[in-house]
Image (cartoon, grey):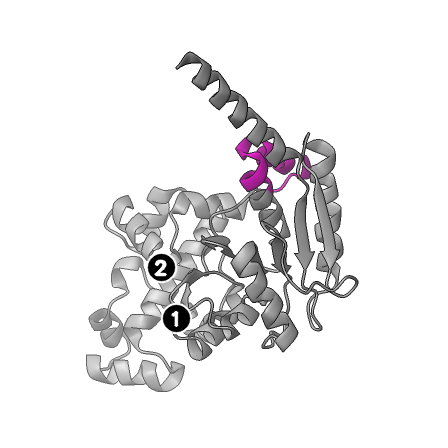
Amino acid sequence: MHFRKILTKKALAYTTYSMQNTPIDLHILDFKGSLQSVPFTFKDHFEIAQKIISGFEFRLSLESETPRKSARKGAYLLIPPTLAPSPPTKREASLIKSYLSKGKVIACCGGVIKLAHLGVLDDKEVTSHWMFQESLKRNFPRVRPSLHKTLVQDQNIITTGGIQSYLDVICFIVKSTMGTAAARKYNQFVQGYGVRDFQIPTIEKKETELEKLFKVFDRYRSEELHLKFMANEHNMSTRSFQRHIKLNYKINLRKALKEYRIQKIKSLLEKGFPIKQISHEVGFQDDVSLRRFFKQEFKMPISEYRKLLQLI
């Protein structure tokens, strides 16, 4: 029994050593329309990781320079960001399917749309850049977007968020192959935020369109922001006031007030206001109600949002 334990420990030690000293195979599908700077950025940062993490080695190739017909076992295929996603060509589709059967596929930003065209994201949770939210919903109804997240893994498919999510991808690969301590070491060196859990939603156009209405709301105290009070202030019946809002601002009052509160919470958080003061300013009964509302609308707790604000 004792001899078997020694053999087992030696086998585990050898396996760990072998994993850490086998170069990680990375192939970038730098298709026409992808952001051309990303392959070089990946190469630079993988070299940084190799320099500072003992035992971390990689082989990186580009489809534009060294086309790959099939995947090597355990290899990663990286689909870079693009602002103009297109369906995969027959060659690209074949290569992606090969990697899905033998390794892992990581799609960044608009590159996620290329995967969606193949149907491999159906019934899966994914993330991408916020600008592709409507495209995903409209063209790929079976895909389940969670765009508040920065990185989502579903078995051998990894999807990532914004254009500059390469740091998250590299942290993910380092953590998967070398462990958390190694990923933390790389992260501290490049002064990034590591594999973040959430993204900050971009400001939507409708907030700008409602700016005039929000200025009207600014005239009232939080406890006055309700239908009956504002209708009386405008010498209208409640029904007439609702029609007035709908006609002039193309939105119903209830939704407008919700958008106003969201905007005001974001503004006060960005200015560093304490939670208690924000609750009072926006008209919540207590901190718990504010936190519950925020998590429901932003898909993250206030504490995480504040961490992200430090990166801006």
Q: What stretch is highlighted in magenta?
A: 174-192
Quadrant of the rendering where the N terminus is positioned: top left
Observer-nearest of 63 and 50:
63
227 inside magenta stretch: no
- Of the numbered discs in the image, which one, if any, rests on residue 216? 1
In the image: residue 105, left or right of residue 224: right
In the image: residue 85, left or right of residue 218: right
Q: Is residue 143 visible?
A: yes
Disc 1 marks a residue whose amino acid type is Val
Q: Where is residue 23 in the image (x, y as percent from the top left)?
A: 68, 41
Residue placed at 44% from the left, 45% from the top?
304
Farthest top residue?
Answer: 2
191 inside magenta stretch: yes
Residue placed at 25% from the left, 80% from the top?
235
Q: Can residue 89 be seen in this view?
A: no
Observer-nearest of 106 and 235:
106
Observer-nearest of 291 and 32:
32
Q: In this view, does 158 lie above or below 130?
A: above
In the image: residue 140, left or right of residue 76: left
Disc 2 marks a residue whose amino acid type is Glu
